[in-house]
Image: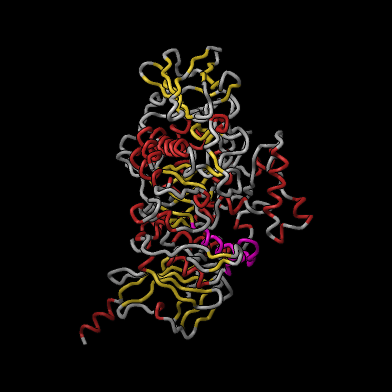
Amino acid sequence: MDAIKDTRMARTIPLGAQVVETGVQFRLWAPKAHRIEVVFGSGKTQSLRRDDETGYFTAIISEASPGMTYRYRVDGKHDFPDPCSRFQPEGPHGPSQIVDSSAYRWRDREWPGVRMTGQVIYELHIGAFTEEGTLDAAVRELDALKCLGITLLEIMPIAEFPGRWNWGYDGVCLFAPSHRYGDYDALKRFVDAAHETGLGVIVDVVYNHFGPDGNYTSVFSDDYVTDRYPNEWGQALNFDGPGSEGMREFVVQNACYWIEEFHLDGLRIDATHAVHDASDHHILGELAAQARRAARRRTIVLIAENESQDIRAIRPVGEGGWGLDAVWCDDFHHVCRVAATGRSEAYYTDYRGTPQEFISSLKRGFLYQGQRYHWQRKARGTVVDQEPAGSFVFYIQNHDQIGNALTGNRLHTLTSPGKYRVLTAINLLAPETPMLFMGQEYGASNPFLYFVDFGSHEIGPKVRQGRQEFLSQFPSYASVEAQKSMFDPNDLMTFERSKLDRVERSVHGPLYRLCRDLLRLRREDLVFSAQSREKIDGAVLGLHAFVVRYFEETGYDRLVVVNLGADLHFVPAPEPLLAPQPDGYWALLWSSDHPQYDGPGIVNPLTDAGWHIPAESATVFRMERDVAATREQNHE
């Protein structure tokens, strides 16, 4: 407890190199070292003072200035980059560079920040989003995303990584935006431009492990990591063991740094189920509180990826939670994937793609809330109570679920156009927060593959082998032929294949129109925009069909009729949710069968003879008042 209190007090002094009035202040946690010297690019050295009680080294060096490069010399022997470097112009193995954090002139002073309500998230990888693969190039696409209906950009990790291309989850210099994506101020220019456009920006951060190449924290302390917890990507970070105060400060300062320095609107925290902390104050709860303070008057959102579906992620700290705002929901994705493809292998084993699963997802967020999960041979998930719908992020594609396939194919290539339109409609009209993956809005033809650049390193063959072993959990990917056809993550062409085609983006085709119209309906329709999972109900109509009714206080309800199978003649219709108000009727509002979406043509499923629901269709109805009938009733 004392250690945690100390780290909170220490955060008034930034880690790394910070420009101050009298020079540059250096601060490093290195209890393992006896002596630390700053070695500048010119060859000059300057010693830092050691605090024997805490293991921190500090000094203000008047001769240092922005633009200068430096390394830390440990005990007079070897030189290493700063683990809290603000910029690595030559990559993680090169020298660190001093930057002036106050030099950039922001234009977003009136930007209020973001909240989860009403958000539509767009996940993207900076390196693959444009041909140039830079933050400045991505700025050119902001207006188009705004016009589509996107409100919040979620950028895959951009912390400095080894090699020329990487998904970002092998970051090692967690304070340094990757030099591959631009200079130090490139992220600031991107965020500034996004805010001018009316878009929020959050960044994916990794606080469960360090990357395998370029991580030098062990030179300074053995307590940054621990072997007390399992971690499939490397050693777990040490948040609750001996010496954990240094790691806690490192991560909390890092989160605050992204929020404060780059005006980010929040963070997406990777694999929070692998962030282990048995102390009285969970590191993520502390991180959440400190990050909100760092944002000052702005509101921010903190989103968790949590494979175990632990509701603590979004419960208030005072109720034993971590105080985050939202959590990714794989259950919904898995149901959609199985419904689209009919295949339920590997980690899709416990899903059937049935109408009831869709209804339960929309109403309850998680499908697994403590039931046995056969794939993992244990219980999965936790009970969802009063958590709002907006706190669950729903998607039918994301970087993991596309990339965790043999060919990296996008979902629209794995199913029929009709089913894909229906699944898109379910996702974008759900009360939960929808997320699109880059290129999804127009049906990008290129795959999104897993890529890293360890080809010239001994890690390269191990990464390829690990990828083959991971994919082999899918029986269809385990054959010798399939394994041989896997794209090598280290190959430049694997990365190049994953880049979006700018020409495709500029053509507003059927899928683009589908997404645009659905997002407009979600935004402008008061019933859908309410995002209330408490005010919906659903019923199964057939083997592949169901209905969801969105209730409105004055009776102007909405009805979404979904059919993922063949034509369904639901006559008679013994389902109360299909009944209009006594003085009302159902008016057709939207259909996935519209020809502008490449649909076969709209056929109203509600006829005088009953419900005749076309195959692979989603239809939205709005309750209207029958004025004549009402007058007649009043007259009687």
Q: Can residue 501 be seen in this view?
A: no
Residue ranking furthest to the right: 480
Q: Is the magenta stretch mostly helix, strand or loop?
A: helix
Q: Is residue 601 left or right of residue 319?
A: right
In depth, the one of 348 and 18 nearer the eye is 18
- The quadrant the N terminus occupies is top left
Question: Residue 359 lies in magenta, yes or no?
Answer: no
Question: Residue 340 lies in magenta, yes or no?
Answer: yes
**How far from the left and from the top, in percent, is residue 75?**
56, 21
Q: What stretch is highlighted in magenta?
A: 329-352
**How far from the left and from the top, in percent, is residue 345?**
65, 64
Tell me if residue 372 comes above or below residue 279 in the rendering: below
Q: In this view, does 27 lie to the left or right of 237?
A: left
**How far from the left and from the top, in percent, is residue 118?**
37, 54
In depth, the one of 258 and 333 nearer the eye is 258
- Classify residue 80 by image quadrant: top right
